[in-house]
Structure formats: C-alpha cells, structure tokens
Image (tube, rainbow, N blue to C red):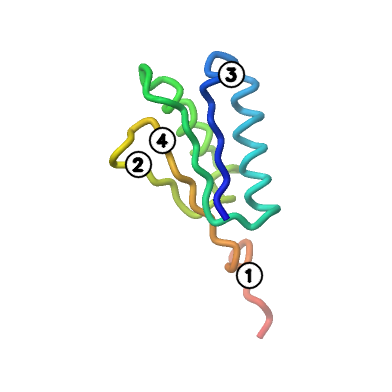
Amino acid sequence: MKLKLDLHDIFNRGQEIDRALRGIIDEAIEKKAAMVEIIPGKGSGALKKKVLRFLDQRDIKQLYHRVEKDGDNWGRLFVHFRHDAPTGRRGRGR
C-alpha cells in the first residue's frame, strides 16, 4: 500500500504542513503502508527543505525506514516504512 500527500494547497501554512506530515506518517503506521509519497512541489525548494527537516526530527525519524528523493522529479519524496521489524532494539523473546 502506498499513501500520498500533496502539499501544494497548504504550501504557505507551516503549522498545517507539520500536522499533515505527522498525520500521513501516523496513517502509514496504522495501515502498515510500505511507502508514503510526499509532493512538496518544485517551486523554490523551501517547502521540500521544510519537509526534510520535519522528517529528520529524532522522534519522527525513528518511525520510518528511509527517505528517497525522486531522481526524475525533484518535487517529490518517498518515505519508506518497515513494519515487520520489532520496534526498538528489543528481540521477540525467542
């Protein structure tokens, strides 16, 4: 499953952007989505930088596996998730 978040409509509302990003990450975890496509758009690049700073926060970064920048469309990012791995460094007690 892949989820998608297009930030074009809220590009100039910082608080709303953070809420939308947190919401899509929470939804991906809840629905066990493998990937979230985030579209900050091309523009000046400021929104993409804001998205990357958001994703780089310690409490957010631990929720996903990796971020991929689209090589063909620099106005798009992919956030990949791994749901099969146990959370934290603990084992499964085997």
Q: Is residue 32 left or right of residue 68?
A: right
Q: Nearer the viewer, residue 44 or 87?
A: 44
* Residue denoted by label 3: 14
**Quadrant location, the C terminus:** bottom right
**Secondary element type, mark 1:** loop
**Secondary element type, mark 3:** helix
Q: Where is residue 21 shown, x and y percent of the image?
A: 60, 34
Mark 4 → mark 3, Cα distance in angstroms: 18 Å
Name the residue located 41 percent from the left edge and 20 percent from the top edge.
Answer: 46
**Of labels 4 and 3, the one closer to you:** 4
Q: Where is residue 76 shown, x and y percent of the image?
A: 41, 35
Mark 2 → mark 1, Cα distance in angstroms: 33 Å
**Quadrant location, the N terminus:** bottom right
* Residue denoted by label 4: 76
Q: Amino acid at mark 3?
A: Gly
**Secondary element type, mark 4:** loop
Figure label count: 4
Residue 6 - label: none
**Secondary element type, mark 2:** loop
Label 4 packing within 10 angstroms: few (<14), some (14-19), many (20+): some
Mark 4 → mark 2, Cα distance in angstroms: 6 Å
Q: Earlier in the sequence, mark 4 or mark 2?
A: 2
